[in-house]
Amino acid sequence: MRRAFRQVDVFTAQPCLGNPLAVVLDADGLSAATMRRFAAWTNLSETTFVLPPTTPVADYRVRIFTPTGELPFAGHPTLGTCHAWLDAGGLPHDSDRVVQECDAGLITVRRGEQAGLAFAAPPLLRYEPADAELLLHLAEVLRLAPTDIVAAQWVDNGPGWVAVLLGSAEAVLAVRPGGVDLSVGVIGPHPAGGPADFEVRAFSPLITTVEDPVTGSLNASLATWLFDTGVVSSPYTVRQGTALGRDGRVRLSLGGDGIVWVGGDVVTCVRGDVEL
């Protein structure tokens, strides 16, 4: 059966500089096995499948697959799926926002975020400082001296993220990890007047290429940590993907209600249909 399909690029206003996402629209009736098989075939970091919502509060439901398994939530698939759904003619209940249903719950996506979209970060599932043993392991994985790590914290909102703060963006770009066996986000500040406020890199065994180009879920959880600890004030910007030849941009802000918003641009690269 032919189903509507989009391939979009997330966290960029220019095609091929962000994080690509495959989106199968009208995925009702597809089995989980078919979804897994197609996600493995696309070989992108994530592929999503849009389904009718199970609650009247939501505008649509989405299932998110990596080439090897399913995720309850992920950031760039949330913005990318919302953009593809709107591009295909989706009409939300509220013109200013879209409510996405996923395994992590209901996620609000705000429209009119400059030229793009922004999602409300979901609550963290694990949020505590890294203990001494984990700190040593993180240094080993990132091939750093333990003293290079300014701070480290569990900031897991689904994919299992542990955050590592380094002293500079230059130090982040110099990381050459080895034996990545957990999901690690590395962040460091750019000097004043730099291309963004922070540089971020994301490494995970869940990612086929080990390093993810631009990561919404990680930046959402990093922002919670950075705002809580006073490292940064709202709003701030992140550059990610530099080491992979990308030029992703993520916009982070803290609402008056304490909600972290993760925003960015999305562009459609491919429109068509797929036989599934």
Image (tube, rainbow, N blue to C red):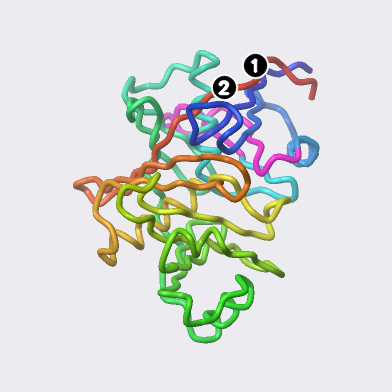
Residue 142 drawn in magenta: no
Quarter of the image where the C terminus is located: top right
Where does residue 173 sit, x and y in percent of width and height? Answer: 54, 58
Residue 271's disc is 1
Asked which secondary structure carries label 2, the reply is strand
| For residue 130, side relative to residue 191 (left or right) | right
Q: Residue at x 55, y 47 (%)?
A: 242
Q: Is residue 45 magenta?
A: yes
Farthest residue to the left: give it: 256
Mark 2, residue position = 268
Circle 1 — which element? strand
- At 48% across and 20% down in the image, what residue appears? 86
Crowdedness near tag 2: few (<14), some (14–19) or many (≥20) residues, C-alpha within 10 Å = some
Question: Magenta part of the protein: which range?
Answer: 43-63
Which amino acid does the dot numbered 1 rest on? Arg
Circles 1 and 2, Cβ within 8 Å, touching? The answer is yes
- Image height check: is 171 above or below 233? below
- In the picture provided, is 42 more to the left or to the right than 122? right
Q: Quadrant of the N terminus?
A: top right
